[in-house]
Structures are given as structure tokens and as C-alpha cells.
Image (cartoon, rainbow, N blue to C red):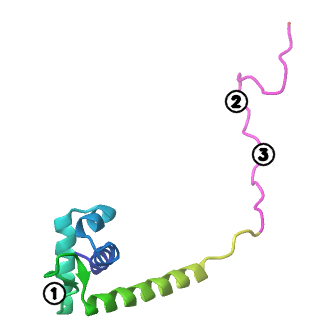
Amino acid sequence: MASHDLTLHFMAAAEQLHFAHAARSQGVSRATLVASVKELEAELGYPLFDYSAATTTLTPAGEALQASTKIQWAKSAAAAAADVPPPGGKAKASKGKGRAPAVKGAPRTGKRRQSR
């Protein structure tokens, strides 16, 4: 699984402190989310959640990872917002005459047909 997905799944679980609710918010199964968190823990080499507690809690390492990830995401969002040009600017003129070409035999709008 991509590292980005692992981080998203961890952050959802860390925010909600409930694996089933976090999985639902990410559109994955609970098993998939737990597997992602376990994979991230294996990559890092330390636990992020205290699994022995009656309720889901973060370990100090999990809290630190959550805080640093929030900071990184905020920096990324600020950098992305800085790259977007401000709205507005010069209006672009139409390249055509402003109306579609006439089709032979089709009624012309705005013109009455002459009676014979």
C-alpha cells in the first residue's frame, strides 16, 4: 500500500480514536484500516496506538506523528495556495462572429417568415 494511504488511514484513526468510524470516513473496511496502521507501525518500528487499553488511545510516539503530520499538511496546503494565481484578469474575446452559421432550410430565429 502507498505510504500516503498509510498516513491518511493513521490520521483518520488518530483523529477519531475509533477504527470502525475512521474506516467508514475513508471508505475502506475496518480490517484494511487496521492493516494500514499496523504496516505503518512496522515501517516506523514502534507502536502508534495503545492496543491494551479499553478504548483506543495514541502512544506518545503516535501523538508526535499526528502533530508533525498536521504541520506538514498545513505547510503543503499553504504552498499549494501560494501557487494559485488570484482570480480575475483579462476577459477573452470570442474568436467567432458571435453566432453559429446558418443551416440551409432551418428557420431563422428573430425573423418572421414571409407569407406568399
Q: Who is closer to the viewer here, 23 or 94? A: 23
- For badge 1, the amino acid type reads Ala
Q: Are marks 1 and 2 in contact (CB under 8 Å)?
A: no
Position in image of residue 63 (x %, y %) = 32, 88
Position in image of residue 75 (x %, y %) = 49, 87
Q: Which residue is mark 3?
A: 98
- For badge 2, the amino acid type reads Val
Q: Which mark is residue 42?
A: 1
Segment colored magenta? 90-115
Q: Which residue is mark 2?
A: 103
Q: Is residue 93 magenta?
A: yes
Q: Count residues near mark 1 (Cα–Cα under 10 Å), then give few for <14, some for 14-19, many for 20+.
A: few
Q: Secondary structure at mark 1?
A: helix
Q: Is residue 108 magenta?
A: yes
Position in image of residue 62 (x %, y %) = 28, 88
Instruction: Name the N-terminal-most of marks 3 and 1.
Output: 1
Task: Give the image quarter of residue 86.
Answer: bottom right
